[in-house]
Image (spheres, helix red, strand yellow):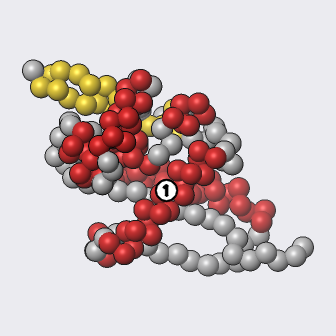
């Protein structure tokens, strides 16, 4: 699917990880459209969930509609990307920090059969960084599309990939 770039001002408002999790929750077969349920399944306090829902609605990326007398929450964001945002901005770094903290927590608290945390070290020419980043972006998008293609998803997962130098060799 085509990706829509989110502008920096909007991203700054919804940079906490749970904003995106709330949008994704709306697609689950077992989704319950209420603050208490969302708070419970994401382990985020109800006040933060309420504010997040308000922000998402104000930005027009979460719609609450009535279908046959039943309230339905709809992720109207399309597929958002931050690719157009300079990657050194504080809000983007903070979101990535939060996601890495969630990964560390998962390592200790999520059974190994429900997660994967792996890494690899390898030599690389700095001139290949751009090519590597493009491969990672392509993988993330293809992986996400494949995983979400099922009509009976029950959980929200986070995929986080990092590419960075371990060494600081002199030229």
Please report the residue visible at 59 percent of the width from the left and 44 percent of the height from the top: 91
Q: In the picture, which quadrant includes the C terminus? A: bottom right
The relative height of residue 99 versus residue 103 in the rendered view (above or below) is: above
Q: Is residue 17 left or right of residue 42?
A: right
Closer to the camera in the image, 56 or 113: 56
Q: Nearer the viewer, residue 148 or 163?
A: 163
Q: Residue at x 60, y 52 (%)?
A: 93
Q: Dividing the image into 4 quarters, which one contains the N terminus?
A: top left
Q: Answer whether residue 151 is visible to the viewer in this image.
A: no
Q: Is residue 155 left or right of residue 58?
A: left
Instruction: Give me the residue at 9% from left, 21% from top.
Output: 69
* Residue 53, picture quadrant: top left
Instruction: Report the residue marked by disc 1.
Output: 98
Residue 110 can be seen, yes or no: yes
In this rendered view, identify the residue nearer to me: 154 or 126: 154
Residue 42 % position (x, y): 30, 52
Task: Classify mark 1: residues with Cα within 10 Å, few (<14), some (14-19) or many (20+).
Answer: some
Residue visible at 53% across and 40% down? 81
- Residue 165 x/y as whole percent: 70, 70
Rendered view: 16 above or below 56: below
Q: Tell me: residue 107, above or below residue 49.
A: below
Q: Is residue 30 left or right of residue 6?
A: left
Residue 11, horizontal then vertical, whole percent:
54, 36
Label 1 residue SS:
helix
Picture quadrant of residue 48 = top left
Outermost residue to the right: 171
Quadrant in the picture for residue 57: top left
Q: From the viewer's perspective, is 166 left or right of 64?
A: right
């Amino acid at each position: 699917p085509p990706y829509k770039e989110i502008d920096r001002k909007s991203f700054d408002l919804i940079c906490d990880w749970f904003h995106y999790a709330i949008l994704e929750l709306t697609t689950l077969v077992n989704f319950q459209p209420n603050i208490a349920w969302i708070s419970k399944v994401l382990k985020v306090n109800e006040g933060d969930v309420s504010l997040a829902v308000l922000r998402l609605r104000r930005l027009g990326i979460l719609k609450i509609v009535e279908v046959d007398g039943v309230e339905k929450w709809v992720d109207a964001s399309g597929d958002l990307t931050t690719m157009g945002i300079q990657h050194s901005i504080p809000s983007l770094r903070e979101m990535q920090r939060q996601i890495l903290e969630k990964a560390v927590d998962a390592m200790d608290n999520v059974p190994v059969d429900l997660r994967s945390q792996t890494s690899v070290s390898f030599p690389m020419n700095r001139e290949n960084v751009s090519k590597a980043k493009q491969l990672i972006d392509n993988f993330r998008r293809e992986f996400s599309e494949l995983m979400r293609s099922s009509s009976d998803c029950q959980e929200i997962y986070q995929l986080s990939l990092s590419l960075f130098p371990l060494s600081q060799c002199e030229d």
